[in-house]
Amino acid sequence: MQLATEYIRGELRPFYPAAEIEPLMRLIFAHLRGYGWHELLINMDKSLSADERLQVAAIVSRLQQYEPVQYVLGATEFYGLPFRITPDVLIPRPETEELVDWLLHSPLPENVSVLDACTGSGCIAVAIAKQRPAFTVAGCDISDAALAIARENATKNATNVTFFNMDILKPAITPHYDVIISNPPYLTTDDKALMPENVLNFEPHQALFTPSNEPLQFYRALADMGMTTLSAGGCMFLEINELYGAECVALLRTAGYASVELRPDINGKPRMIRAVAHAPVQASLS
Ligand SMILES: C[S@@+](CC[C@H](N)C(=O)[O-])C[C@H]1O[C@@H](n2cnc3c(N)ncnc32)[C@H](O)[C@@H]1O
């Protein structure tokens, strides 16, 4: 009987480079059997049950359409935590983990309130709540379908996060927050030509593109919202398009933010900003 590994390699070879097939195979086996890395090495070449063979065939057929593996398996990891993922939510990216890391390593008081604006799968909000149980964490999004997944992810990770529907472009009056963090939509139709097909064909366009087709639309809205919603000394953490770092910094300074800091990601691209809202009243960020 043909081994599962041979079958998967053979089916995916015409579609993916060999270097991508091995990690895909590991994810498939981890999904099917809950294997960790070590068990995988020992057991990967065992044959599959009839039911597992059917599951593998279905997975392989979706991968052959270039559907992202996170949607095929309905799962991913973010900041070391498991997340359920469906086509209603953006697949969390490693750059966003870096933004979360910046917040977690910033000198904030012990019990701040945090809003994750444009929360999607809830990955940012849930990761922060898990790492800082004393924080009060909320997440908002315009998509009810995304909010349902975010709520599932909060439960899955035993965290306490409040999720609510809000259009960031027409914000209702919100309570004060000490911190706003956001990875909003920032792409325009001009970016489409450079985007991989699997992103364009499978990820939700509402999560990727701005409705006005203007790259800074959400940053303007978030900057204004922060100036009315953030407590004195509170701060904003934003993931940005690497092409608009200077523009985002200028926009935040013009809106009245102090200490606007642009930071590169692990690949050296300017991908995130921390900005402090007006006069700090307590020792936090300068
Ligand atoms: C780039 S995704 C980020 C998702 C998640 N925070 C992450 O980093 O993986 C942007 C999110 O913004 C939401 N969104 C789009 N337009 C919005 C609006 N006007 N108000 C609030 N959320 C919006 C989308 O539904 C999507 O979940």
Image: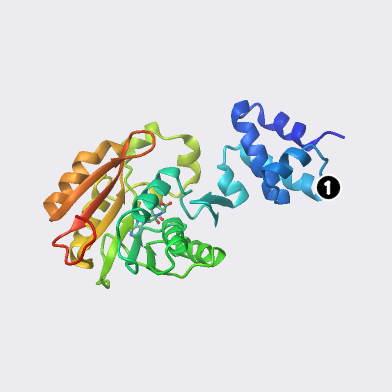
Q: Nearer the viewer, residue 151 or 166?
A: 151
The image quadrant that residue 114 belongs to is: bottom left
Label 1 neighbourhood size at 10 Å, few (<14), some (14-19), many (20+)? Answer: few
Q: Nearer the viewer, residue 147 or 273?
A: 273
Q: Nearer the viewer, residue 176 or 67?
A: 176
Percent x, y of residue 89: 47, 54
Percent x, y of residue 69: 58, 43
Q: Residue at x 28, y 42 (%)?
A: 263
Residue occupying the far right of the picture: 1
Q: Residue at x 37, y 55 (%)?
A: 104
**Viewed as shown, does residue 128 lie left or right of 109?**
right
User: Taking 48 as reference, is 178 above or below it?
Assistant: below
Q: Quadrant of ligand 1?
A: bottom left
**Viewed as shown, does residue 44 lie left or right of 62?**
right
Return the residue at label 1.
49
- Asked which colour scheme the image uses, the reply is rainbow
Percent x, y of residue 220: 21, 53
Where is the C terminus found, in terms of image quarters? bottom left
The image quadrant that residue 285 belongs to is: bottom left
**Secondary structure category for the residue under label 1:** loop
Is the residue marked 1 within 8 Å of ligand 1, measured from its CB? no
Label count reads 1
Percent x, y of residue 103: 34, 54
Where is the N terminus found, in terms of image quarters? top right
**Viewed as shown, does residue 112 lie left or right of 1?**
left
Q: Amino acid at mark 1?
A: Ser
User: Taking 102 as reference, is 161 above or below it?
Assistant: below
